[in-house]
Image: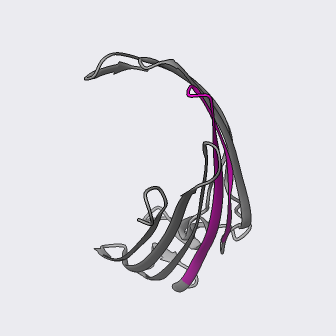
């Protein structure tokens, strides 16, 4: 915390997953670092910005039915965001921002959002928002290879991942109302 109202957060984690399945042996190492800074601006305004980096090292050894090709891959995700919040009077707040991300699966993704909230009294509030969100494809969707065969048949059906698999995109519209009749109860 710097002064009375600005703050810097740095978070990091490491995760190792090992899976020994009858159809495959799988190891995934993930390192994630996240930085976020929040500071007040002039006259009821606040700016928050940040950046993140994630690297995933994945190794998979199939047993004939299921495999990933190539068997090892390292994928990265780099992102940054900025958000500006303005408070009008004591009851209206507007927030606008965007996140820009680059990943090894679908390239650059832009995810803007805008939100407005109104709190006419301490126990009533209403809000609305428009946001664009993205679900990044996974290695399973890109690199999978599955062989399906009936035991007595000579034909094998092979299901393959798609290197051109794109991200799923969502344009979300949100509206809500909250009533807090007491300190311990709120209804949305």
Residue nearer the viewer, 167 or 95: 95
Q: Is residue 29 above or below residue 4?
A: below
Decide: is 7 above or below 182. below
The total of numbered circles placed on residues is 0
Quadrant where the N terminus is found in the figure = bottom left
Q: Which residue is drawn at 52% across and 80% down?
A: 55
Q: Residue at x 60, y 42 (%)?
A: 44
Q: In which quarter of the image is residue 135?
A: bottom right
Front-most of residues 147 and 120: 120
Residue 99 part of the magenta segment: yes
Could you say where residue 171 lies in the image, as x and y percent from the top left? 70, 40
Among the 4 quarters of the image, the one containing residue 19? bottom left
Farthest residue toward the top? Answer: 181
Residues drawn in magenta: 74-102
Picture coordinates of residue 34, whole percent (x, y): 49, 70
Left or right placement of residue 120 versus residue 97 in this view? left
The residue located at (44%, 63%) in the rendering is 3
On the rendered structure, is 140 left or right of 152?
right
Q: Which residue is drawn at 41% across and 17% down?
A: 123
Q: Is residue 184 visible?
A: yes
Rendering coords of residue 71 (x, y %): 51, 85
Asked whether 80 or 84 is in front, the reply is: 84
Q: Foreground: 100 or 91?
A: 91
In the image, residue 124 sits, relative to residue 10, either above or below, namely above
Q: Magenta region, mostly helix, strand or loop?
A: strand
């Amino acid at each position: 915390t710097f002064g009375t109202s600005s703050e810097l957060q740095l978070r990091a984690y490491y995760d190792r997953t090992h899976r020994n399945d009858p159809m495959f042996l799988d190891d995934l190492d993930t390192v994630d670092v996240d930085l976020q800074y929040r500071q007040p601006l002039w006259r009821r305004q606040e700016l928050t910005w940040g950046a993140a980096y994630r690297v995933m090292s994945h190794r998979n050894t199939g047993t004939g039915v299921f495999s990933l090709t190539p068997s090892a891959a390292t994928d990265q995700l780099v992102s940054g965001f900025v958000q500006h919040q303005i408070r009008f009077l004591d009851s209206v707040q507007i927030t606008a921002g965007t996140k820009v991300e680059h990943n090894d699966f679908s390239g650059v993704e832009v995810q803007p959002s805008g939100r407005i909230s109104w709190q006419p009294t301490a126990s009533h509030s209403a809000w609305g928002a428009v946001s664009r969100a993205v679900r990044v494809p996974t290695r399973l969707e890109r690199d999978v290879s599955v062989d399906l065969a009936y035991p007595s048949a000579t034909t094998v059906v092979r299901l393959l991942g798609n290197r051109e698999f794109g991200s799923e995109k969502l344009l979300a519209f949100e509206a809500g109302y909250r009533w807090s009749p007491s300190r311990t109860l709120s209804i949305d």
